[in-house]
Structure formats: structure tokens, C-alpha cells
Amino acid sequence: MTAAAGVRRLAGVGPKLAERLADLGIVSIGDVLLHQPNRYEDRSRITPVAELWQGSPALAVVRVEGAEIRQGRRRSLLVTTSDGAARLWLRLFHFGPDQQARLAPGTWLRLYGEPRSGAYGMEMVHPEIQVVDSEAAGYDIVARLVPVYPTVSGVSQNRLRDLVGQALSLLEQPGFWLESLPADLTGPAVSMSANQALRRIHDPPIDSDVAALAEGRDPACQRLAFEELLGHQLSLRSRRRQIRADRAPAMGQPGRGLAPLFDGLGFSPTGAQRRVIGEILADMAGRSPMLRLVQGDVGSGKTVVAAAALLTAVDNAWQGAFMAPTELLAEQHHAALSRWLEPLGMPVWLITGKRKKDDTLLAEIASGTPGVVVGTHALFQEALEFGALGLAVIDEQHRFGVDQRLALRNKAKNGGATTAHQLIMTATPIPRTLAMSAYADLDTSVIDELPPGRTPITTVAIPNTRRDEVVSRIGDAVAEGRQVYWVCTLIETSDKLEAQAAEAAAEALSEALDGVHVSLVHGRMKANDKARAMNAFKAGSIDVLVATTVIEVGVDVPNASLMIIENAERLGLAQLHQLRGRVGRGSTASHCVLLYQGPLSDTARSRLTALRKTSDGFAIARADLELRGPGEVLGTRQTGAQEFRIADLVRDADLAEAALAVADDVLAYHPREAELLIERWTSAAAAYARV
């Protein structure tokens, strides 16, 4: 038997328990061993009942004196016990006839629980109970640190400990848990074998530093974390190799160059934009598919970079696809790309889920006519076939899963190419440790320069009790000829509820601000109505635009210099930073007001403080990673970037760097170990990569 065997091979695991274990991510016996305790209990001594302290978990040995069912607000079984010197009451809310029978008078028990002050004296509510043969047997303990595991309803701690014990005994069998790290790897992270590390985290020596174990700083945790990070790194590198083994269209420089595009922009691209465009065009000139992630802070000009790549594709007689996460953003990108590219004789089409099916347009795209198709998830629809897709651009990548962006890439069919070049863009800077763990299959470019003329944004946090002052400030800004955003947010994501909140806010502001023109944009409006409101705001005929978070990205109104974000405590740092980036695009000093509802949680306070202190997107991204963890920062769960079992990208940044440094060598020189690591740590991602 190997660690990959199903968990039902363990004694006592039937279909129902297996189903509940699957909710914990436990499917195989190996998963049992990788289910890390989140804390440890010191059960090295018996505490007399008289010495129990409220709130301090302890081990005690007592004799049952009596038990009776009490009918209070909740039905409970109250058990009276004593160690001969003092009484202790046990209160059980979940019990049955079998448990009542076990707690007959005269029965000796070994208990572990947290004492609290009850109606009759010190009591424990649902302690761990072990029936023992005698008082002497109760005191006959093996001093140990007992692991406490994350669990779900229907899976007790004792059941998990039993399964772990069975799995640990299997470690003694040759071939059950193969050592997966190459023997030539050195360093503190590999100071012990995987077998030793697994035994230590589940059954640590009594003198272990329990804080280090629980926090993942113990050498055993670090050993397994390094192996996990390496496994993920290898999975992504392996997928990259498979993709780059395909053929892609080699696109030389367009005959007319990029000068006509730049001349029509009305502004000169920054040095950073020109550098990143050069990196992209160098990739597109090759026969291997480009896999490039472009990171740029809010307002750094990523759309211009994409336009240059799309122009190159179409001038080389290929088609380009530009995928955006929302209808509004797709419409705005379509407008910008049409303004820049159509004067150069290049068609730019728009396809979204809400637009009527246009068979003539679909036929033209299927025929391979060079041009650019802008759209949302509708680009995946079966009816849409690209005759010559050479470049796929995905905007705001964190809104899409890996499977979605690969599905768009695989729409390339004709021209002798098996896949399209792929350009992925994000306005949410990604900390290095997260990028190298989640996007190791991509090359990375950074637009680290903002266009000239941008003004700093002053950010303040104001409680909702001062709402009238904020509304008055809006009136002052409009009187000075400036425009204002008012953003509404809700705890639950709901187009209907958000629309209602925005409508109510717009009505209240219209009543409070006499003579101020207030308009509205939200996700439930028809596309034409949204476009009409946005265009009116851009043209300056609307003073205050009340919106939901649909204006998070893509909106560019230089005259808008004030933004109020209502209930700012409900949003993550990255989204707050994105919203704030809608102002500060002109020459006037701009302000962002974070209107919050107190009292603030510690996390919410940390978010608002971080946003007030800096406008650096990368600094904000690092703070966001520390506050929310990688799964939340990435947004849509990425295949191959699932939650880590042992590793923590904030705590283990040095291990992630070490894994990155050796990944290519392991793939090249130790293919057997690489395959084992991928299978052990990222089996779902590896299976996907083979599709």
C-alpha cells in the first residue's frame, strides 16, 4: 500500500466518514498525514480539581457521583463528579442512551477540557472523556503533546487522531512514503527526512516549542513547507514547458511600425511602456507561445501596451482577442481600441453576453479576417470560432481562472499554429513571493512608471457619523468646477441590492445638494444606459456619479478629483486601491474619502491605515497579502494556486525563493523526483496540465 491509497483503506472509515473527510481535503491516506494540527495541548500532568482555573484547559481524573437530565433553555445532561477533594460538574448538550450508560455512578474518568464557572461550581462543557478501569489507571498517563486538528461536523478529534495513528504506523512500511527530494539538495529546510518531519508534527517530543509547531516555524514544518513549495513550482514549470512546446505564429515587426499608433494617441508613451512593449514584441516574434504577465499600477497605461501587441498581431495577418471581466469594462476597452486602431484601417469588434447574436460578424471572425475581438466571457461561447487567433489578451487576470484563460488560448485553430500567444494584464500588483508561486508559468513585465502630470491623492478615513460634512464637501468641490464619484458597497455581492443602495444614495445626494447634477451607474442597468451615463460624466454634464464597484477599473475622467467610498471597511485593500485610482488623473489635487461604519475590526483598521499611508500599489499588495493571505489576494481560485496545506507565502518567503532557485535543476536532472513531488502536492493541477 502507498500513501496515494484511498482513505477508506483505514480501519473505521466508511462511506459517510469518507465524505466528511473529503470536506477537509482528506481523500487519500497521504492526505491524513498532511492534515496539519493547528495547536497542541500539554497533557503531561493531572491537575487536582481544586486547582483548576477558569479558561485554562487541563487534564483531570474524577469519579462519577451521579447524572441527571436538566430541562433548561437547552436540554442537557449534568454529571456530578469528584476527585475525592473537590467536585467538578460536566455538562453535555449532545448525548444519547449509550453515553448516559457509560457515565454510571462509580465510573472513573480521565477528562480534558476547559473549566468555567457554572451554576453549582466549576464545570466543563463537553470535555474529552475517557473511561478508565480505576483511579490508578486514570493517573497512569504518558506525558505527551496532543495535536488538535482542523475538523468539520461529524469528525471528532479522537477519530482524526486514530486515523493519523494508523497512517503513522504505515510509514514503517517500505515504499509507503517515498522520499521525494533529490539527495543532493542541501540547506536548513532539508535537515530531516519527510518521514521524520511527519512524525514530529503529529507526535512531537514533550519538550518541543509548541508555539513554533503551531505557527509553522518548527524545522519539521519548514521541511514539509519547502517540499510543498517546490512541488507547486515544479507543477507550474512543467505546465509552462508543455505549453511552450506547442507552435505559435511568429510575428515580425509590422511593416509600418508602431509610430502611427503612437502618433494617434495624443500623448507619448512612457519609457516603461516602451520597454514592456519591446519585451512583448520580442516574445511574439518567436515560434514558442508567449506567456507574459504585465503588472502595472492603476493608471500606468496597460491598454496602450495591449494595443501595440494587437496592432502587431493584425498587421501580421492574425486576429487578436481582448477579454475583460465585465460588460462595462469591455465596452470601455472597445471604445478606446476603436479610437486608436480603426483609423489605421483595423476592425475592432465587440462581443458580450447581452449583445444580440450577429451571424454576419461571427462568420467574418470565423473566416479569419484580421481584426480585434473585444469581449467578456462571451468569447468562450461555442458559436464563436476564430479563423486565425494569434494573440489572446486577458485583462484583470485575477477575475478569471487558469482554465478560462487557457480555453481562450485554445481557440486558435488555423494557420498552422496550435496555440495563440497569451498576454495577461493586471492592475493589482502581485508581491514577488505570490507571483513566483502562482504564476511561475509566466514571464513577468512591470510598468513601473506613471504618465506625467498625475497628481498625488490625499486619502482620509472618516466615520459615517460625519456624513453631512462629507456631503457638504461635495458641494464645495462641484462649486469649484470639479466632479465627484460616490461609490456604494454592500457586505453581500448582489447586483439587485447594490443597485438599490446606489439608487437610494443618488436620491439622497440629489435632495441634499441643490443644483448639483447627480447620476447613477450600476450593474443592473442596460449597456446603453450605462454608456450614456459614463459619457455624460466624461463630458462634464454630470457633477456627481453614484456607482457600485463596476467603476473599479477602466474609467478615466481627469476632471474627477474627489471620491467617496461608502462602507470602505467592507472592501479589501486591492479593491480600495483600484477604486481610488479613478481620481488623481488630472492636474488638480485629488482626494479620496474612506467613509466607514464603526466600530472597526483590527483587520479593517489595518486596511484603512495602509491605504492612507501609501499610494504605492506594490506596497499595498504586500500589506494585502499579509492581511488576507494568497487565496484572497489572487481573487478567483486559480488552478495550480490552491491553498497550501503546510506552506505560508508570507511566513515562508525565504523557502519560496529557495524552491524557485532549484526548480529548473530538479526538472532537468531529477525527473522521477519531480514527478513524485508534483503528484504529491499538486495532483489536481498536474492532472489539469495534462489535459
Image: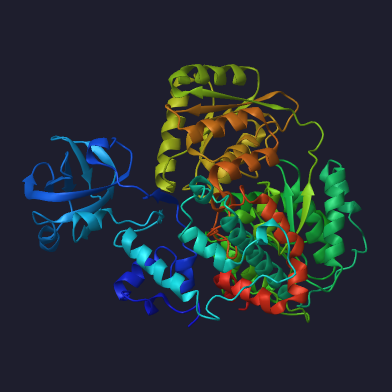
Q: Residue at x 54, y 23 (%)?
A: 516
Q: Is any atom of residue 543 visible in this view?
A: yes
Q: Is any atom of residue 545 visible in this view?
A: no
Whether residue 288 sits left or right of residue 510 in the image: it is right
425 vs 86, nearest the viewer: 86
660 vs 585, nearest the viewer: 660
Q: How many marks?
A: 0
Say how the picture is coloured: rainbow
Indicate the position of residue 581 as horizontal and vertical percent values: 66, 36
Outermost front residue: 136
306 vs 609, nearest the viewer: 609
Indicate the position of residue 253 as horizontal and vertical percent values: 90, 64
Q: Residue at x 78, y 46 (%)?
A: 447
Question: Relative to 211, is 170 above or below?
Answer: below
Q: Quadrant of residue 108?
A: bottom left
Q: Quadrant of residue 120?
A: top left
- Quadrant for the C terminus, please: bottom right
Q: Residue at x 48, y 83 (%)?
A: 1
Whether residue 589 sits left or right of residue 202 in the image: it is right
Q: Quadrant of residue 222?
A: bottom right
Indicate the position of residue 92 as horizontal and vertical percent values: 17, 50
Whether residue 431 sits left or right of residue 8 in the image: it is right
Indicate the position of residue 515 as horizontal and vertical percent values: 52, 20
Q: Residue at x 43, y 78 (%)?
A: 6
